[in-house]
Image (tube, rainbow, N blue to C red):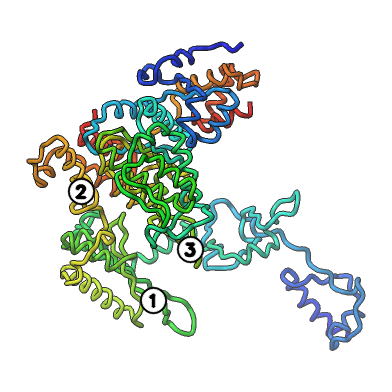
Amino acid sequence: IMLKGMTRLVSRVHKAKHGEQHVGQHYNISIQELKTVFPHGLPPRFVMQVKTFNEACLMVRKPALELLHYLKNTNFAHPAVRYVLYGEKGTGKTLSLCHIIHFCAKQDWLILHIPDAHLWVKNCRDLLQSTYNKQRFDQPLEASIWLKNFKTANERFLSQIKVQDKYVWNKRESTEKGSPLAEVVEQGIMRVRNATDAVGIVLKELKRQSSLGVFRLLVAVDGVNALWGRTTLKREDKSPITPEELALIYNLRKMVKNDWQGGAIVLTVSQTGSLFKPRKAYLPQELLGKEGFDTLDPFIPILVSNYNPKEFEGCIQYYLENNWLQHEKAHTEEGKKELLFLSNRNPGLLERLCAYL
Amino acid sequence: MAAPSLPAWLALQTRARTLRAFSTAVSPVTGAPRLSPPTTERTSKHERAPRRKALPPRTEKMSVDQDWPSVYPVAAPFKPSAVPLPVRMGYPVKKGVPMAKEGNLELLKIPNFLHLTPVAIKKHCEALKDFCTEWPAALDSDEKCEKHFPIEIDTADYISSGPSIRNPKARVVILRVKLSSLNLDDHAKKKLIKLVGDRYCKSTDVLTIKTDRCPLKRQNYDYAMYLLTVLYHESWKTEEWEKKKTEADMEEYVWKDSASEKNILETLFQIKAAEKNTELSKEELLSTKEVEDYKNSVVSLKNEGDNENTISQYKESVKRLLHLT
């Protein structure tokens, strides 16, 4: 029988009421919610942890709380504000982003979550010439995977939102004006060739209609520095492709501009998975480059740093309660000091270290 | 034959200290074969004159406060018997130490400066003092030197003993000047820095011109002065094509007409439109305090790069602009 310690007190408190005093404590997300809200987007090690412990617990931390405070006070008539989470490797940017997404999902926002923009600029096997615009390239695989996950996350909205234009896919198929967005998504999933165009249409429609106030839109992109970097993709004649020539990236860039109202844009910049960036780079300007910074300006940079002592204690307590730390010295003071020294309170490192104990 | 050979042998004996010592037990019979022309037959071991024993090395007789410049007055190869240091050099074998200095070829191969110890150099300077003129008493600080003599010229003269007194290295002339002592305005300074490229050091603000393309030192000096004059006058002129300077050519970030300015204006206009407050014009928006703060923070962020200070400043200014608490 596991002792439910102090860390569980928060599980029954609704996320909307998270405040300063809850820093360092964990809150629970049920597994069903996990499947609907996060079909993609959780870091792989966290997914493994969820499977092992049979529950998903996120720690409440200051950067996420700060962002939640801003989001609660957003004025939806103003253009969407951009928030950029930055920090060193393993400090918890992706998980903070997931915390925000969960909060917004509970508040009934429409979540547009791109789990890792870096996946769209490297290792793509089939690149087709785009049907819509001859200069650009399509990525059918990535687009269809994303559409499937988007459908799972936002089922209930897809039937409510109606497209406002007629879209012709090919000689036989077309989507009429006024039909639900679900049809466009279905078309993209079934006909993989048109998946990229379907994604483009979805983004365009959501942007247009969120300004009308029908719903609130949260655009969450992890690794947004991929949009302005370089790609490792090449054409048949081995000449490199710039990000603008990929239709997915082109449409996503339009999404993170602040020329629409009725929502918020939360982004992270990360070096893991980025191309041609030095390992130690973590500051926003280094990773975004000149073009990226000029496009995202003005934005609010939010630093995600290593655990503070209270959060560190909380994390160790959580592992101890779930009987994750089997080493006999793990719960002693010296053991904790050793872990502190080895991991420097870095959440990612701590998680990897504890996996061995 | 024995009688005339005896005095010759005695005369030889008086120089015994520096020459090989002759044994006194030599029989007169062997004296004769030495004076005869050399034969091909080998002399037996006991008939050969035995060698003198090796003397102890000179290092053992050196005192600690001796006059070192007289041991090594000129550049000379390393003499292990004359250098009293227990130097070891060489790659050691397994479980060994580097080789000692006696008979060490490595120590002979490398250049040594045993003739240029500080004591020796002091002596050189003392001797050279007679040939020098006195330093002017009025120039007693660096700032005064810079103020009155902003241009510094470095030349080198070489003397060596050889068939010719000329040395091709002697024609090099290095001219150094600080740009702060030249009368340049902002545009002229940027143009000059672009023209000279690598020759300007940003941290010390020194322009270095090194010339060696003429055969004589005087010609090189004239050429360096000519280059400086031309650079100065050219950088003051503005050409037609300089008006096409793009953002990529700029040395530092200028906020006016930049993408950041456009973004912020668009954002603010949209905010105002949402609040039905469309009376403000572009100039008024630009002159508000929040926009000023934002402009300063962006300029410092771009010019200095990211650090905690600049980022937090930027964050605060954006929060104030967008009216977030």
Badge 1 or badge 2: first in the primary sequence? 1
**Mark 1 to mark 3: distance in Å?**
57 Å
Q: What numbered label is drawn on residue B261?
A: 2
Question: What x and y, as percent, mark residue A60?
Answer: 42, 23
- The residue at 49%/81% (across/down) is B162
Badge nearest the viewer, 1 or 2: 2
Does the CB distance between marks 1 and 3 fall below 8 Å? Answer: no
Secondary structure at badge 3 equals loop
Question: Chain letter of disc 2?
Answer: B
Mark toward the viewer: 1 or 3: 3
In what element is the residue under mark 1? helix
Disc number lying in front (3 or 2) = 3
> Residue at label 3?
A235
Cα gap from disc 1 to disc 2, whole angstroms: 56 Å
List x then y, in percent, for residue B58: 65, 59
* Rendered residue at 13%/44% (across/down): B286
Are circles 3 and 2 on residues that touch, CB within 8 Å? no
The residue beneath circle 1 is B170
Q: Is mark 2 on a helix, strand or loop?
A: helix
Kind of residue at badge 2:
Glu
Report x, y in % for residue A337.
54, 22
Disc 1 and disc 2 in contact, CB within 8 angstroms: no
